[in-house]
Amino acid sequence: MDIIMNQDSYVIMARILTAACLAGLIGAEREYKRHPAGFRTHLLVGTGACLAMVMALFGFQPYLEENPDISAYDPSRLASYVISGVGFLGAGTIIVQGVSIKGLTTAASIWVVAAIGLAAGAGMYFAAAFTTIMVVLSLFILNDIERFFRSSIQSEKIEVIMDKNDAALSEVIKVLEKENVIVKKLAGGADNRVEQGTKLSFDLHIDVHKAINRTALYEKLMKTDGVLEIEMSLSKDR
């Protein structure tokens, strides 16, 4: 029993448990908001990162003691591989729907959880705990602040009819981007309402600031090459 459990074993257990608790706390918030990567994913990432750091600090001690001539050993190298490798896991939580992207916050939280696990594995309990508090506060409280800023943004749909032979949807999107209008989703194709399919119809779902001059935006869109008709709301509130 003494061979398995020694002073280092209790230190390792404390660090892994700390990483699991802190990572699980962040994961619980993601689980509460029904995100793809929730409690278990964050807990596993944080615990695994902590284990990698603990292994880097304690796992090679017997080998180094048996080979005193080896002095160029850097435990941080294993930690750097964890940080870069967890990026692939975070990428799996990012979902692209049309031109909109979801899951970036969850991907960032997974990356931070890995860093928290490494900090706990290195024995930096205060840094790990303080970072966890900051992350949880940002995910809960700052979400309301973000919602406050978004209150001046409303979602709308613009229908664009374009000439099939001179259609340049990219130019329409450029005009919208210059006016700080965010295109979230688009769909369209041949306009079946027109014989021989000489026109293309596109539906653009956008986020637009309430203060924007919609009449000026309408005029700019109508001047775009290939645009025949525009259907959009000119009122600020629907």
Image: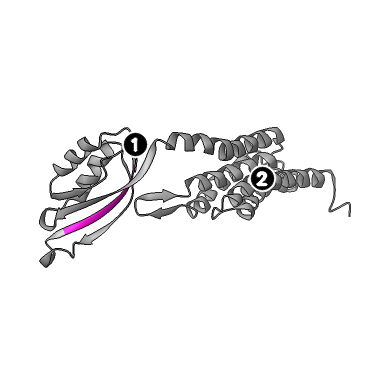
Q: Amino acid at mark 1?
A: His
Disc nearest the viewer among 2 and 1: 1
Point out the stretch of residues depicted in magenta: 200-207
For the point 54% across and 49% down, which residue is it? 86
Q: Secondary structure at mark 1?
A: strand
**CB under 8 Å between discs 2 and 1:** no
Which x, y percent locates residue 60? 70, 47
For the point 27% across and 36% down, which residue is it? 179
Which x, y percent locates residue 78? 60, 45
In this view of the protein, can residue 60 be seen by the observer?
no
Give the main secondary structure, helix, strand or loop, of the magenta stretch: strand
For the point 16% across and 50% down, which residue is it? 229
Which x, y percent locates residue 88? 50, 52
Residue that lies at the very extreme toward the right in this rendered image: 1
- Does 87 appear above or below 139? below
Q: Amino acid at mark 2?
A: Leu
| Left/right of residue 119 with respect to residue 2 in the rendered view | left
Q: Which mark is residue 209?
A: 1
- Does 230 appear above or below 180? below
Is residue 202 rendered magenta in the image?
yes
Q: Which mark is residue 25?
A: 2
Q: Residues within 10 Å of mark 1 (few under 14, many from 20)?
A: some
